[in-house]
Image (spheres, helix red, strand yellow):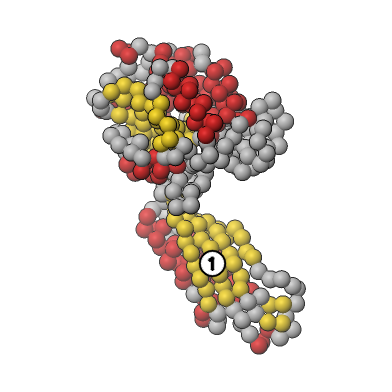
Amino acid sequence: MTYHPDRLEHARSLADRIVAWRRDFHMHPELGFEEFRTARKVAETLNELGFEAETGVGKTGVVARIGEGRPVVGIRADMDALPIDEENDVAYRSQTPNVMHACGHDAHTAILLGVATMLSEIPESERPPGQIRLLFQPCEENQDEEGQSGAMRMIDDRALVGVDNVLALHMDSGMESGKIEVCSGYAMAAHDAFHAIIRGDGGHGASPHLGTDPVFMLAQIINAIFGIRARRIDPVKPAIISIGTIHCGIASNVIPASIEISGTIRSYDSDIREQLFAELERALAISRAMGGDYELEIKNGYDATYNDPEISGIIGDIATRMAGPDVLNPPQPMLGAEDFGFMTKLAPGAMFQLGAKFDDRDRGHHTPVFDIDESSFPLGAALLLESAFHLLRKSA
């Protein structure tokens, strides 16, 4: 395997710039498909580096094509923030009320700008033949009114046409800073949401025998739903159905006429995904056996993210050459979801986790106290670029 021994030092020389970009994005977070300032800053920086930036891709995304011809390796970074009010007392705290970068997308964007800067400083004659395509993606955390996420919109706008492989990283606030974790095979789950209404007659709490009680029905249905994973799904296949909300009732002495519940469905395998949908219908049908009825709506979310085993191995090998044999953590597949999976369905690719534990406090993703160790950024940039170069050479 060809490996440039100075790549990490090159990235470290840009550490202050990467951190400055991250802090700027962190102070000015924007929700999905509203990343107007972020996209403008990204495009301006790319143009200053001498690369033409295409804007408005997938609504608010930015694409830069560096090099020509084939092969093509895409590197993706998501740019959107979350509707969370930050609680951290830091100089770079969010200046937008109730909006915060609580998942590391500010770092993803800054690190990819670091990759662009490295490319601008490497003579064209020293780059492998082919093209590196930088994909600054909007709206990973949500979907628009048509059920489309940022990755889906960028694909619709042909941002991945001709891409042979695609790479990405994700910050991990719970993993030791500077560690790398890369799964071979499924790395993140398919994610779907459900909303159901369970209907009865309702009535007076003192006369439950005169009607059908949806609360009593729900008690049986919950057991059936939680039994799906235990008794209906192959025990070696990952799967989850979790109930997140239950809403009913207006008074303590009134049996409600209906109950609304909602939750999340996670899986890897497409057949298991369909089975979970069918088993949820069967569980809710208990209401009909008890004299009631139900309605179920399933909203399809993201496909599972599949890491190509060969590419995962390349990333792991380069990481150990770059930072030593102890840099790799044992891979831990998770049932979190990521729309990067839509990209890896089009082109073999992989996403690795970059450890960035900030301090001894639990700073979980999607929480008001999320924060990350910025000293990890150069390793992420160097590993993305060196992996992309290797894939270009390999394909060529």
The location of residue 145, given as percent across then percent down, is 48, 52
Q: Is residue 287 left or right of residue 314?
A: right
Q: Amino acid at mark 1?
A: Ala
What residue appears at the point 49 percent right and 31 percent down from the top-left corner? 39
The location of residue 98, given as percent across then percent down, is 66, 41
Question: Dot 1 lies on which element?
Answer: strand
In front of the other: 96 or 6? 96
The N terminus - image quarter = top left
In front of the other: 371 or 131? 131
What residue appears at the point 50 percent right and 21 percent down from the top-left corner? 378
Q: Is residue 80 left or right of residue 361?
A: left
The location of residue 33, given as percent across then percent down, is 50, 41
Up the image or down, 45 lies above or below 357; here it is above
Location of mark 1 (residue) = 196
In front of the other: 145 or 300? 145
The C terminus - image quarter = top left
Q: Quadrant of residue 222?
A: bottom right
Q: Quadrant of residue 57?
A: top left
What residue appears at the point 36 percent right and 18 percent down from the top-left corner? 3
The location of residue 127, given as percent across then percent down, is 32, 17
